[in-house]
Structures are given as structure tokens and as C-alpha cells.
Image (cartoon, grey):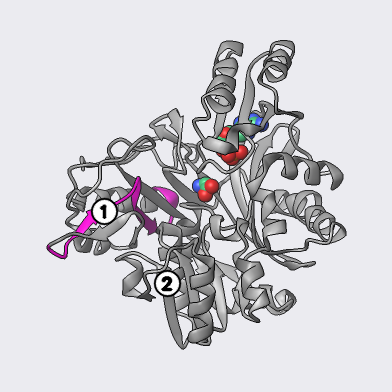
Amino acid sequence: MKVLLVGGGGREHALAWRIAGSPLLTRLWCAPGNPGIAQHAECVPIGAEDIPALVAFAREQAVDLVVAGPEAPLTIGLADACAAAGIACFGPSAAAARLEGSKAFTREVADAAGVPGAAWARFTDPSAARAYIRRTGAPIVVKADGLAAGKGVVVAATVDEAEAAIADIMESRVHGASGAEVVIEECLVGQEVSFFALCDGTDALPLAAAQDHKRVGDGDTGPNTGGMGAYSPPSVFTEALREEVMARIIRPTLAEMVRRGTPFRGVIFAGLMITDAGPRLIEFNVRFGDPECQALMLRLEGDLLAALHAACTGRLSEVSLGWSAEPSLVVVMAARGYPGTPAKGGAIRGLDAAGAVPGVTVFQAGTARGPEGGIVASGGRVLGIAARGPDLAAARDAAYCAVAAVDWADGFCRRDIGHHALPHPGTIKAA
Ligand code: AMP
Ligand code: GLY
């Protein structure tokens, strides 16, 4: 099978690594890829959102399957364009990708499907939004309706903070057009879990869960990011909870999407809050999580490519995937300045030494080749140092040992990945 993977981050590096190991694979390209992905795939210089060029390339090369990594190409119709060209694509249509592209749409679908979630309201008028916030009180959550690279959400502890978020999102438009509408939600309390399931339109196959660390600072402090680290499986996510989430959240949502004439194919990512009253939906994404995917791929047993292809061809019931009982953990190394403007161009050395630590796999995200051919930083989240081990503490220690081997002046990471499940910090060497 000839495969074109779309994207160029840490998630795509992890997907490329597993797809490359499939006995079904004959050739793998990645657009645009990165130097880490180039170890497993032929990188082609086509942007992940250049739909006409991606489809033309897939046609020329007689690609059998296009695999979408990020949400952006899906929300602008990558899967639709592939379908029109007769090419199988792993990922939802633009209509179904609205589950991620619009928070208000997601809440409407979830309500129609009876999915348990937070109380919410939507506003296009900042004064009405402010009045609602004053009426409801804090804590309260303010979200830009559209895509904002995981940064359009403010969990406000006070009414003042929530009102400031309205000013930033709706009036100063710090996230651009995504701030034309806001969704305001009840603040849910509990442990957050990212859960993934493969979907073929009508059927769903549960994958595994992971716990992300969204805040930039240790102890879950500072601004939200795309994710600073993850581990899998999260101890709070029992098998019973997984069944409850499939029955009350995933399957009803798929049925509602079918009812609307926009069946969902691809991987659905349910951002959940495990509250005292049970699991509650925070959001859907229409892709694997980054860095959750890196943690999942370390535990996956079975043929990922066969499973992705089956999801595109309505044969999910034939797929069996297993998960290693060994836990995995990934530490994201980001560039100074992230989640604001990251420092770019800094040389990164020591990746081979990091990858040589037993149990460790190094995934590259925002990396590029510098003028002398070495690896340099080119984005906010730059490396995902992942490890699997006999227990979570062992995986954590291996990952931080590898972090210490990375020589990158501008890099930083959280020092407490896994802290919900590992209350006692290990001996962490300085990076
Ligand atoms: P989202 O982009 O919707 O995933 O939101 C980003 C982060 O904000 C989530 O991962 C949560 O940590 C937090 N968050 C979003 N919605 C809520 C909510 N209703 N209650 C509590 N925290 C939330
Ligand atoms: N790590 C969270 C996300 O991928 O949205």
C-alpha cells in the first residue's frame, strides 16, 4: 500500500514510525514532514493545507491511502477532495470535521446526542457575553468558537478574568476571526483524560487513553499550550469508564453525525473531564492528540496501517489492536518563548544519545535542517522525548534521562510529567 501522510509534527513522526513498520506498506511519503519523519518516509515539500497540491501528488503517485495528521487540512476539505479524486483518506469530511472546527457546533451535536457535558451558552455580542458571565459567576470557561491552536480557551477563576477574556477574544481578536463568537461554559472539576476511538462512519473501535499536560508550567501553572507532555494509560480511566464513554459519548455522537448526513470517519479524540458524577465531554477533536499520539504509539501492538485503512473502508469490525501493559510517557521540549513567540534556529545536539537511552524513542516536531545540515529548532514544540517502561516511574525516569542528553540552549520542558499518577518526583538530572 502506498501512503501519503499529511503533517509535519511530533504526532506525524509517531504515526510515520508505526506506519513504516506495517507489512502492508510499499511506499510512504510525508507532506511536508520534518527531519525526524525523514527517517521513515520520503518528505515532499507540499504544505499540509495545500489541498490541490496534495491531491495532485497523491494522484500522480497512485497513492492508496492519504492519512491526515492535523485538523487544519480536514476542516478545509482534504478528505472531500480525496473522495472526489477516488483516493481513500483517513480523516473526516469538512462537514464532520466541524466537531473540532466549531465549539458551538460540537455542543449542539453533543446536546442532540444526549452526551453528558458542561452547561453552555454562545455569544456573538460581547456585552451579552459579559452580562451572562456576571449572572453566572466564576469560575467559568471562555472559548473562542473557532480554531485557535489550542490557545483559545480561558479557564477564568474570577469574573474580571472572564471579562478580560471577552475583551481579548471578541474585541482585540487575539485569535483572529475565531473570536467572532464565543462559547461560555460551566467549569468542570476533575481529572482530564484524552480518549481516542477509530470510526468508520457507523462503527467505532476504542483505542487507548492518555493524560495530557496543557499548561506550560510545572504544577499545571501558566498559560495553556498544545500539550507539554502525556502518559498512557491514565490510572483514573478504568475499563468500566471506557465502556461508559463508548456508550454515552462516542457511539451516540457517531449516530447523531449519521442522522445529520455527515458520518464521521477517522479518529475521534474526546477530551473528557472525569468528574465525581462521571465522565463529561469537554471537547472533540478530529485527529490524534499531540503529544498523546506519541505516548499511544509506544504502546500500540498490531498493524496501525491496517486499522487506519479499515476505518476508511467500513471494515473496522475486522480489526484487532492491542495495547502493551507497559505504560508510556512523553516529555515535550519546547523552545523558549512558547506558547508565545518561540526562539527559532537554535542548534539541537545529542538526539542520538537521547534515543540510545533504553526504552526511549525521540520524536521530532518543530525541527528543520540548519545551514550546516544539523537539526535546528523551527517551531514552538520541538521534541517529544518518549519512553515506555515496566512501570510509569521507570518510563518517566528514562524520558528525563534522555531529556538530559539533549543539548539545546533554547529548550525547556516541564519537570513533572505524569505527576497526577506519580506523586513523588524522581531524580531528574538538569538538562
Ligand atoms: P479545549 O480547547 O476545549 O480542550 O480547552 C482547553 C483546556 O481548557 C482543556 O483541556 C481544559 O483543561 C480546559 N477546559 C475547557 N473547557 C473546560 C470546562 N468546561 N471546564 C473546565 N476546564 C475546561
Ligand atoms: N494535546 C492536545 C491536543 O492535541 O489537542
**Quadrant, the C terminus:** top left
Residue at x 62%, y 74% (from the top left corner): 82
At label 2, which amino acid type do we have?
Answer: Cys
Which of 368 and 424 lies nearest the eye of the viewer? 368
Looking at the rendered structure, the secondary structure element under dot 1 is helix
Region in magenta: 372-393
Ligand 1 image position (quadrant) = top right
Which residue is the extreme one toward the left? Answer: 372
Residue at x 61% of width, y 12% of height: 159
In the image: residue 381, left or right of residue 23: left
Q: Is residue 271 left or right of residue 299?
A: right
**Front-lying residue, 105 or 239:** 105
Q: Is disc 2 surrounded by few (<14), some (14 to 19) or many (20+) residues within 10 Å?
A: many
Q: Residue furthest front?
A: 52
The residue pinned by badge 2 equals 30
Is residue 298 left or right of 334 when viewed as pictured? right
> How far is mark 2 from mark 1, CA to CA?
26 Å
Where does residue 356 sit, x and y in percent of width and height?
Answer: 24, 64
**Residue 223 part of the magenta-drawn span:** no
Image quadrant of residue 161?
top right
Residue type marked 1: Ala
> Residue 243, percent across and down?
75, 54
Judging by the rendered image, the residue that carries numbered circle 1 is 402
From the viewer's side, name the closer residue of 402 and 164.
164
Q: Is residue 381 above or below residue 184?
A: below
